[in-house]
Amino acid sequence: MKKTLINFSFIFLLLILNSCSAQDSSKPEPIILTPTENLFAKGADVGWLSQMEATGYKFYDADDSQKDCLQLLKDRGINTIRLRVWVNPSNDKVSGHCSKEETVDMAVRAHNMGMRIMIDFHYSDSWADPGKQNKPAAWASHSFEELKTDVYNHTYDVLRALKTAGVTPEWVQIGNEIPGGMLWPDGSSSNFGQLAQLLNKGYEATKAINSSIKVIVHIDRGNDNALFRWFFDAAKNNGVKYDVIGMSYYPYWIKSDYTATIADLENNLKDMASRYNKEVMVVEVGGDYTLVDNTYNMLVAVIKAVKNVPNNKGLGVVYWEPEGEKSWSGYQLNAWQSNGKPSLALDAFKN
């Protein structure tokens, strides 16, 4: 009798389990939410922000309430923060800072607000751009072989510090506006073979941290297709490794209204994507802060041009130092008002 009861209990238990299994199988599969694959990056480079705050600059919303600058940017559609990093910078208010430690602190702060992160390596102690690509003082006497190691180690060190702090950038720029190369004279584009080796060291260090980080190679004059073909043909011929073609677009500096060059920008974006099978991005843009409507319309047009690149290869648009209000920075192409409030030009990112 006892054995019969045990068998009956076992059969009853199996019936319950089968019933539960049948009920579960009738339920829909759980929905797993994943990040949007092709989320358009609407960005701001805010390398000055920590120093603006350190000097007591206050940021305000339209209702006169004091707010965190990053929150003000986020409220206007910005979802990406770009940060430059210098090797051994000075303490100069405008042309210094942006050290590894300061970059990590700001990246963590932006990341904790849900922002995407781009890191821009200048490989210098201060500004690197088409007119100057000075070696860091600590690297000045190094041989070319040592410079390659310097690029790798510096890139790896900064990105490892970010990773330790819980931040993995989505994009990393190896060099800033480098049509003439970087780490002059060794990495001049007149010796593209050596420039390629330096760029590849930055690429390798980035991928060693996380292979999913997209590496950007960035030059200026985004409306100049001949310049871009020359540079990226040379990059291809010399085996440069990268994922994204980054460009600057500043009609102000070429003494032109954007309406005269916006078609050239769009054509260049599309040509770069198809010619080299790469994603493209406007990583720097800006307009005269006194011409609010013009800057707004320019931003709308640039965003549209990038979005018009076929196959979702146009990744986004980044405004360079929108918060750098003129009285603090001396910079004409900011997008902030003298009362500490964002310019209405930034509303272009809301749409």
Image: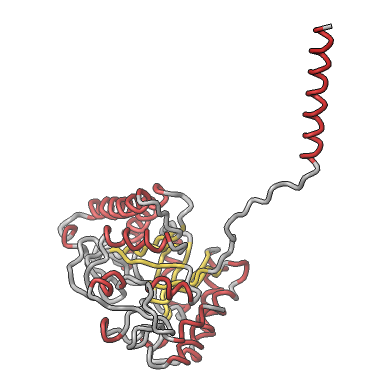
Residue lying farthest to the front in this orientation: 1
Is 230 placed left or right of 328 in the picture? Answer: right
Q: How is the image coloured?
A: secondary structure
Which residue is at a point 55% across and 73% down the rendered structure image? 271
Which residue is at a point 82% across and 22% down the rendered structure image? 12
Residue 222 placement: quadrant: bottom left
Is 216 placed left or right of 24 in the picture? Answer: left
- Residue 351 drawn above or below residue 295: above
Which residue is at a point 49% across and 72% down the rendered structure image? 42
- Point out the image quarter for the C terminus: bottom right
Residue 127 placement: quadrant: bottom left
- The foreground one among 306 and 170 is 170
On the image, the x and y values in percent for residue 105 come to 31, 60
- The foreground one among 292 and 2 is 2
On the image, the x and y values in percent for residue 89 come to 20, 65
Which residue is at a point 52% across and 70% down the rendered structure image? 272
Is 23 placed left or right of 181 in the picture? Answer: right
Is 28 placed left or right of 282 in the picture? Answer: right
On the image, the x and y values in percent for residue 35 come to 57, 58
On the image, the x and y values in percent for residue 170 come to 46, 59
Residue 56 placement: quadrant: bottom left
- The foreground one among 241 and 313 is 313
Q: Can residue 160 be seen?
A: yes
- Residue 316 drawn above or below residue 286: above
- Point out the image quarter for the N terminus: top right
Q: Can residue 229 be seen?
A: no
